[in-house]
Image (cartoon, grey):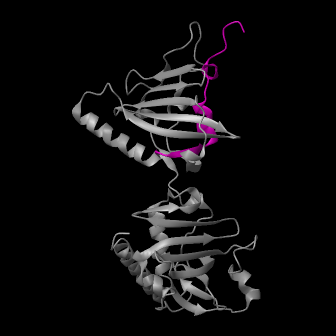
Amino acid sequence: MKPGTFYAFAGLTAAAVVAAGVAVSTQTEITSLTAGTDPAFPKLSENVNNVAKIEIRNANSEFSMTLTGDNWGLDQKDGYRVEFQKVKAAIVNLSNFKLIEKKTADATRYERLELNDPSDEKAKSRKIVLKDEKGTVLADVVIGKLNPNLFGTGGAGTYIRRADEKDTWLARGQVDLGEEPNNWMARQIVNYGQEKIRRVVVASPEGAEIILAKADVKAPNFTIENLPEGRSIKNKDEADPLAGVMWRMMFDDVQKAEKQEWPAKPWVAHYTVWDGYTVRIETAKFGDDFWGRFSAEVDPSVTDAKKKAAAEKSVAEINQRTKGWTYMLTAGDSEKLVSKMSDYLAKPKGT
């Protein structure tokens, strides 16, 4: 991680903590506990830029994230990238935890503070361990019950139990650890609203196609170019959802492409955007789920140098991010990507 990555952010967070302390002294209706100055995790406070491993455990899941180069990846998902902002927030927020008051050391009372062992299937506690690249533990703690406004608006208090300690503590601070790996991963694959789409071609493994297009960027609806003779579309906006499938497109799961034996003839969709490039989506079914592969290329019809350069940049970003991965698609998206022409046609007259 680059030096100074977290320092500016940590400074802002510390300033917010001081401000919250001032608020306590001016609000008599709020708890009058002192703000506290001792860091809950001294090693972490001194090494926010050196965290290279995060391990999280709760009653429902156990997962970890590792820093490789400048990127964080989820270990249980082949190192697929996680949201850096979430990692940064977790590290900095934990580093700013301040000890307020020592609480019970009676293990039978841990559950009341949500500090019992996270391995208990009914536990509400969450355990997090942060390490540097050498494996040195910088923080190891069970995170318990949260009171988001204990010290006034924005002044949260959290019960914690540090590793190898029986004592529990009330600490000033708050951290969001998510419940499962999907809460950390960068789950958006692409994000193109239908207003950005010029043409769509969806082809089945047998070669049957649906071709949608707009003659003009301001046209209100997509038309089916290859509408069968004598047939009509159900209604004027029937095909628009298919054209909009890439809007905030998310995945439910992800894995390395090499782990799947991809069929020779999958469903293939091409989405050409007005900006001059095409996103290709291959879709195949594995068990009960549909998975997709993504790639992009510049539209060969683009001749304007400036537009072509911008398109090449977008294509490179998409391919760099998606190459080598397959994504479990949501039910709504996969249903559209395996559409048939008959899905969009009105019944023939007289039937």
14 magenta-colored: no
Q: Position of residue 305 (x, y in %)?
A: 22, 33
Tell me the magenta residue range.
323-351
Task: Tell me what residue is drawn at x 71 percent, y 84 percent.
Answer: 110
Q: With respect to residue 317, does 272 lie above or below?
A: above
Q: Quadrant of residue 49?
A: bottom left
Q: Position of residue 15 (x, y in %)?
A: 38, 80
Residue nearer the viewer, 273 or 26: 273
Residue most extreme to the left: 305
Q: With respect to residue 151, does 240 lie above or below?
A: above
Task: Tell me what residue is drawn at x 61 percent, y 18 percent.
Answer: 345
Q: Quadrant of residue 163?
A: bottom right
Task: Tell me what residue is drawn at x 40 percent, y 80 percent.
Answer: 14
Q: Is residue 5 left or right of residue 100?
A: left
Q: Quadrant of the C terminus?
A: top right
Residue nearer the viewer, 218 or 330: 330
Residue 32 visible from this viewpoint: no
Q: With respect to residue 304, does 104 lie above or below?
A: below
Q: Is residue 75 left or right of residue 280?
A: right
Q: Position of residue 320 (x, y in %)?
A: 40, 47
Task: Tell me what residue is drawn at x 39 percent, y 20 percent.
Answer: 215
Residue nearer the viewer, 129 or 148: 129
